[in-house]
Image (cartoon, helix red, strand yellow):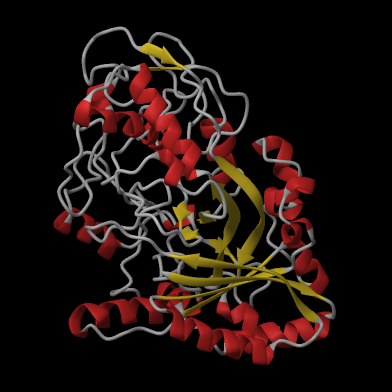
Amino acid sequence: MPVDLSTTLSWKSASGEAAAMLAELQPNILKAHVRDRLTVLFLGFGDAAEARTFLRGLSGLMKSAKAHLEEVEAHKRTKAAGTPYLGVGLSAHGYATLGVTAPADPSFTAGAKAAVEKLADPAVTEWEGHYQQTIDAVVLIGDATAGPVRTLRRQVEALRPASVTILGEESGLGMANANGDGIEHFGYVDGRSQPLFLTEDIDAERDTTDGVSEWDPSAPLEQILVPDPAAPDPTVHFGSYFVFRKLEQNVRLFKEAERDLAHDLGLRGEDRERAGAMLVGRFEDGTPLTGQSAPGSHHPVGNDFSYDSDKLGQKCPFHAHIRKTNPRGSGGAEAPEEERKHLMARRGQTYGRRHDDPNADLPPRLRPAKDVGLLFMAFNSSLGNQFEFTQQIWANNPAFPFPPDGSQPGLDPVIGQGIREPQKYPPEWGHNNVAEAADPIPQAVTMKGGEYFFMPSLAFLRSL
């Protein structure tokens, strides 16, 4: 039977063409691969024939999605360590240099530099140097510890000819809070509310977390997989569009904004923590603001919630980051089932070392103002309808979502790019009182560069 892209997949019982797909798909697409230590290499091709040989050689170092899932299952049983992750993606220019038919997504064909105006990104001349160059490929090397990453990096280097140049490099370094949950540099739990494509993962979400009765995390394969047009058999060989963006976080500025908002709203004592939660939509420990007025989420972080009990934004402001970027059927512009189609599989990792505890109660002046942030990475089946839609139509759109009173919520205070206006916040959680206006939240996240890639099938790489 053909691979059914209209639904989720059980990898354990996959057979026929579905099993063949998993055996030729790169890891980290359908399910995140551990990458607490991550090296990202951006490459330029000087000679097409040598680049083909290099990519073909890399395929011999890579494992399949099926092998990755089997490693995860073995780790659950025996705690056995898995092998490191090697991922390979090509830009549209990379495909052209190789003389190979590229996937046809128009945003991919145009490249990330062409989306600057659409996404309100900084001008390309303001990007970091290596992102201003023409990037042909990206190589990701990740694992739980640094040793295997270094070893695999040396193996990659041994295959690389002089004509394949390293234009730039990034290093990811995972962070966690006291509960062991992954966090980003502002101190908030990150990585929840992912679309899930494997029935085994959906079952685990239902049975081992707070459930799936309010929010169904399942998503069909067609929301992430794309037939690989240049592979030997695109009916079973699939890939995915990969977004990479380096986002620098000015932690000091964001913490000053949290402090000033708490002051402007007259929040006192422990309720001051709600100021930051109104910007993000969750407290630092991951507790959804729409569910309760203070932190204290059970571990693991709760995610089974909707905004049905907060239709007026009296608990979680309409412009809060997680409400803007995943309105959970409450956006008001589309039917809930259409709204879900914009969600992407995020695979980001933090970068930069810091000496302060992100969750400690410290004055903002002791926080870093530069050199830390997020290596934003996400898989999509449609760049225009997923990543670009989320950034342009949701995060950067002051009119989204649509409150009942017809007002404009404003930009996403975390990743929104554009002119920032004063926004309104409920001074008391869940009370039917008049929301109070506060000064604009300064932009504390700056895009430093990026590119669009396609992560092709292993069969394609071997066939070069």
Residue found 41% across the figure and 59% down from its top: 355
Compared across the picture, whether 204 is left or right of 43 comes to left
Compared across the picture, whether 344 is left or right of 306 comes to right
Q: Is residue 324 visible?
A: no
Indicate the position of residue 129 as horizontal and vertical percent values.
75, 58
In the picture shown, does residue 275 fall above or below 362? Answer: above
Residue found 23% across the figure and 58% down from its top: 178
Residue found 41% across the figure and 45% down from its top: 186
Indicate the position of residue 210 as horizontal and vertical percent values.
16, 48
Total residue callouts: 0
Residue found 66% across the figure and 67% down from its top: 229
Residue closer to the observer: 111 or 314: 314
Indicate the position of residue 410 as horizontal and vertical percent values.
50, 22
Q: Quadrant of the C terminus?
A: bottom right
Q: Quadrant of the N terminus?
A: bottom left
In the picture shown, does residue 430 fall above or below 28? Answer: above
In the picture shown, does residue 56 fall above or below 19? Answer: below
Residue closer to the observer: 97 or 99: 97
Q: Is residue 270 visible?
A: yes
Indicate the position of residue 449 as horizontal and vertical percent values.
67, 52
Compared across the picture, whether 24 is left or right of 120 comes to left
